[in-house]
C-alpha cells in the first residue's frame, strides 16, 4: 500500500465523520493551547520579576537589620532584639573600597497637605545617592542635594502621582508642602515610573534622611542600599559590609546582606519551576484528549467494521490496517496541534494588547513540548483501537454489514 493511498484513506476518514473528527480536534487544540498559554504566562511572570529587580539598580546589596535564619528551637526567655541600623553605620560602609555608593533608607507614612488638599502618602528619607542607585529619573527640578548627611534640610522631591494629587496642573517647584508638622519646599518631581517590587515610587515624597529621622522621631534605618563598584566587586563588598557592621555592633552578626543577583536567581528558579509545573498540569488535558481519541476511535471501528472487512478482503494485511488507523489518529493529533498553536498565538497577541506592560513571552520549549506530547499521546492512545481493527476477521466483518 502506497503512502498516497494511506494519506488518502485517512483524509477521507477524517472528513467523512466531521463530528467525531471535530471533537478530537477540539480536545487536542484546547490541550495544546493551554500548555502554550500557561507557560507563556509563567515566562512572562519570570521576566516581569527580573525587570523589577533590574529597576532596583545594578550591583546592588540590601542591608537589613536582624538575621534571616531561625534557630528552630523555642525562643529564649531573655531574647535579644537585633541592633538597629543607623546613619553612622551607613557612613561607615561608604569607606569600603568595593563600595561605590551608599543610601540609607528611612520609611514612614505621614499626611502631606497643600492648602485645602491633603493626603496620606509614603515618606522616604535618603540621600542624593538614592537617585543613581535606584535609577530614578527626574521630571522637573533637582533631587535632594548632596552634602552633609546629618543636615536636616527642609526640602522634598515629590513622586509623579503625589505631585498631581497635591498641585494638579500647577508647577510645584519652589512651593511649600506640610509634611506632618513641618514645612518642606518642593525642589523637584520624579518622572512617572510606577511600581517597583510593590513600592509605588510615584506616590511618595523623598526628603533628606536626617529630616526623616527627625520627622518620625527615630534613629533606626529601614535598610541600607549599597552599590558595589562593579559586578566583580559584589562578593567583596558583601564581605566588607558584614565585617564593618560586625565591628560596629560589638562582634555581633545581626544584619542580613542580600545581593541583587542572589535574590533574582532564587526567584528565577522558583518561577521556572512553577512554569514547568503549570505547563505539566496543562499537559494533563492532552492525556484526556488522548483518552477521547481512544474512545472515539473504538466507536468508529464498530461503525466501520464492514469497511475494515472489505480492506482485508481485497488483500490488506493486518499490519497495513494497523498502520491506517495509527496514521489516522496521528493525523488528527497533528491537526489539533496546529489549531491549538494558532489559538495560543492569537491568545498571546490579545493578552499583549490588553496588558502591554506585562512582558508576555512564549518559551521556545513550550510549543515543541506541546506538539511532541500531543502527537505521541494521540499515537499511543490510538494504538488500542488500531490493534482491534487489525485483528478483525474479514468474513465476520463483512457479515455484519
Image (cartoon, rainbow, N blue to C red):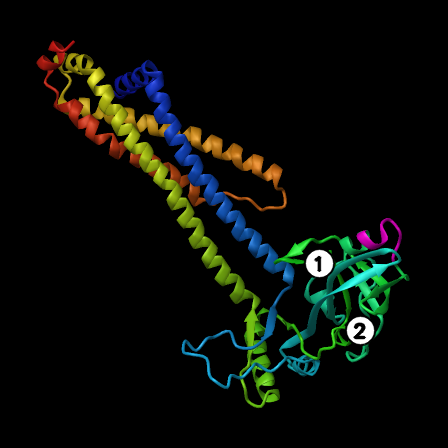
Q: Which mark is residue 201?
A: 1
Residue 55 lies in the magenta-colored region: no
Task: Tell me which residue sits at (49%, 48%) in the image.
Answer: 42
Q: Is residue 55 left or right of residue 68?
A: right
The quadrant in which the N terminus is found is top left
- Residue at 48% x, 62% y is 266
Identified at 47% across, 30% down, the residue is 342
Expressed as whole percent of the image width and height from the top left, the position of residue 329 reads: 29, 27
Residue 282 occupies which quadrant of the picture?
Answer: top left
* Residue range corresponding to the magenta coloring: 165-172
**Image-quadrant location for residue 337:** top left
Q: Nearer the viewer, residue 60 or 267?
A: 267
Quarter assignment of residue 95: bottom right
Distance, label 1 to label 2, CA atoms, is: 20 Å
Which dot, 1 or 2, sits closer to the camera? 1
Q: Is residue 47 left or right of residue 25?
A: right
Residue 275 % position (x, y): 44, 49
| Disc on the earlier residue, 1 or 2 | 2
Q: Is residue 165 visible?
A: yes
In the image, 399 versus 51, the foreground residue is 399
Amino acid at each position: 500500500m502506497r503512502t498516497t493511498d494511506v494519506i488518502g484513506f485517512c483524509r477521507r476518514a477524517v472528513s467523512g465523520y466531521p463530528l467525531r473528527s471535530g471533537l478530537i480536534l477540539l480536545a487536542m487544540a484546547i490541550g495544546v493551547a493551554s500548555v502554550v498559554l500557561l507557560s507563556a504566562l509563567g515566562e512572562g511572570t519570570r521576566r516581569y520579576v527580573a525587570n523589577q529587580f533590574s529597576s532596583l539598580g545594578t550591583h546592588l546589596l540590601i542591608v537589613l537589620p536582624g538575621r534571616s535564619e531561625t534557630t528552630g528551637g523555642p525562643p529564649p526567655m531573655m531574647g535579644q532584639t537585633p541592633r538597629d541600623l543607623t546613619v553612622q553605620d551607613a557612613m561607615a560602609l561608604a569607606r569600603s573600597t568595593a563600595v561605590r555608593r551608599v543610601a540609607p533608607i528611612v520609611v514612614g507614612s505621614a499626611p502631606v497637605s497643600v492648602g485645602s488638599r491633603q493626603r496620606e502618602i509614603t515618606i522616604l528619607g535618603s540621600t542624593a545617592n538614592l537617585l543613581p542607585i535606584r535609577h530614578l529619573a527626574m521630571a522637573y527640578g533637582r533631587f535632594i542635594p548632596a552634602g552633609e548627611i546629618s543636615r536636616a534640610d527642609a526640602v522634598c522631591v515629590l513622586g509623579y502621582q503625589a505631585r498631581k494629587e497635591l498641585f494638579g496642573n500647577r508647577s510645584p517647584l519652589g512651593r511649600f508642602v506640610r509634611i506632618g508638622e513641618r514645612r518642606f519646599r518642593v525642589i523637584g518631581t520624579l518622572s512617572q515610573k510606577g511600581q517597583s517590587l510593590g513600592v509605588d515610587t510615584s506616590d511618595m515624597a523623598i526628603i533628606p534622611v536626617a529630616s526623616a529621622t527627625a520627622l518620625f522621631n527615630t534613629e533606626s534605618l529601614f535598610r541600607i542600599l549599597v552599590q558595589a563598584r562593579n559586578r566583580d566587586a559584589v562578593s567583596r563588598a558583601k564581605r566588607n559590609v558584614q565585617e564593618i557592621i560586625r565591628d560596629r555592633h560589638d562582634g555581633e552578626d545581626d544584619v542580613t546582606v542580600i545581593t541583587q543577583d542572589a535574590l533574582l536567581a532564587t526567584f528565577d528558579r522558583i518561577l521556572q519551576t512553577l512554569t514547568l509545573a503549570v505547563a505539566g498540569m496543562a499537559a494533563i488535558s492532552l492525556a484526556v484528549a488522548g483518552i477521547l481519541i481512544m474512545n472515539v476511535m473504538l466507536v468508529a471501528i464498530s461503525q466501520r467494521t464492514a469497511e475494515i472487512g472489505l480492506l482485508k478482503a481485497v488483500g490488506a494485511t493486518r499490519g497495513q490496517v494497523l498502520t491506517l488507523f495509527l496514521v489516522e489518529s496521528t493525523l488528527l493529533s497533528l491537526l489539533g496541534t496546529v489549531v491549538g498553536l494558532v489559538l495560543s498565538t492569537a491568545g498571546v497577541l490579545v493578552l499583549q494588547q490588553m496588558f502591554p506592560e506585562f512582558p508576555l513571552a512564549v518559551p521556545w520549549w513550550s510549543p515543541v513540548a506541546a506538539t511532541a506530547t500531543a502527537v505521541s499521546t494521540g499515537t499511543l492512545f490510538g494504538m488500542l483501537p488500531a490493534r482491534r481493527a487489525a485483528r478483525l476477521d474479514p468474513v465476520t466483518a463483512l457479515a455484519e454489514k
